[in-house]
Amino acid sequence: MAVGRRQRSEDAHAFALQQFRNERQRQISLAAAVVAPGLMVMAIILFMGAVSGAHLNPGVSLAFALRRDFPWKRVPGYLVCQLAGAALACLFLRAVLGDVQHLGATLPGPGYENWQALLMELVLTLGLVSVILGTASAAQNVGPIAALGVGGYIALAGLWAAPISGVSMNPARSFGPALVSGDFTSYWVYLLGPLAGALLAVGFAFILRGRGGDPISYAAGSGTLDPGTERERRLLAEQLARGEVPARNEPPARPRAPAGTDPTGSDPSTGADPPT
């Protein structure tokens, strides 16, 4: 049941994000066009991050899996839901608004070639996934504030690079308009660039912070529906707050028992188990 909840969450998130991305193609200012998706991503992370991890992006799912913060067995289901959510959003918008600006298709800007858009998407996605992995790690332990970092980065990247590549940074976001319109001419740019950027971000994360897999990062990448995940995350957060750095790949230590009590929680005078 938890797996179904995660996948439905990713599907709904991709649907919502695609609508905001497509709406920005209408006659609005550049600032509004790039800030809206960033705010939407921020809201989704705060709203449902604990359920699915709020990946929204195949590159993010692959990055979390490579960092051991997300089970590989869930990756195919997440990718299908992300692609399906983006396609459904485009079908909905075409039914309501018609084929406005090719349903928000991401294409190289006027005067720019595919290779220039490819490099821009690679660099932008490298930054985005680095922000996501960094704010999700035990090294930062920023919790819900991570949503501000991710949403803010998306908005700033759009202000800087939207005229060059359209600032997709997400193969699913570009897949929806391409599928519904039937035009995959430049889709390879928005598949290869973001995936390559995500892989580079994983490499940089390994160099800077070593291997992943700690409870805080796992909870951020996978949600907290798994039994014990939230408890382990809280224990590790308490250790870090006390200045204790647990050995890598070891489970977080239990809080120290008060003097005169059994560490297991039982009553030393009677041997009785703690109440449940």
Image (cartoon, grey):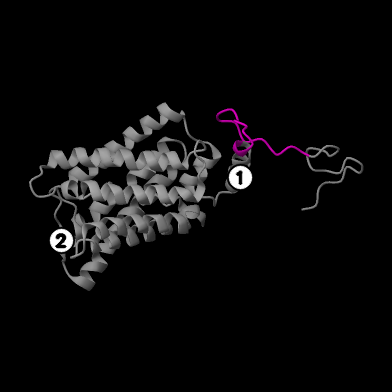
Q: Is residue 22 above or below residue 230?
A: below
What amino acid is found at the position of numbered circle 2 in the picture? His
Earlier-in-chain disc, 2 versus 1: 2
Dot 1, crowdedness within 10 Å: few (<14), some or many (≥20)? some
Residue 206 image offset from top left, x and y in percent: 42, 29
Report the magenta residues as a range. 240-257
Magenta span has 177?
no
- Residue at the spot x=24%, y=61% of the render? 22
Residue 266 image offset from top left, x and y in percent: 83, 43
Identify which residue, 29 or 76, lies in the foreground: 29
Q: In this view, does 70 lie to the left or right of 154?
A: right
For the residues labelled 2 and 1, the Cα–Cα distance comes to 46 Å
- Residue at the spot x=43%, y=38% of the render? 134
Mark 1 residue element? helix
What amino acid is found at the position of numbered circle 1 in the picture? Arg
> Residue 212: in sight, yes or no?
yes
Disc 2 to disc 1: CB gap under 8 Å:
no
Locate residue 233: give its quadrant: top right
- Residue at the spot x=78%, y=37% of the render? 263
Q: Is residue 115 left or right of residue 50?
A: left
Label 1: which residue? 234
Mark 2 residue element? helix
What is the residue that sits farthest to the left in this orientation?
Answer: 111
Identify which residue, 232 or 153, lies in the foreground: 153
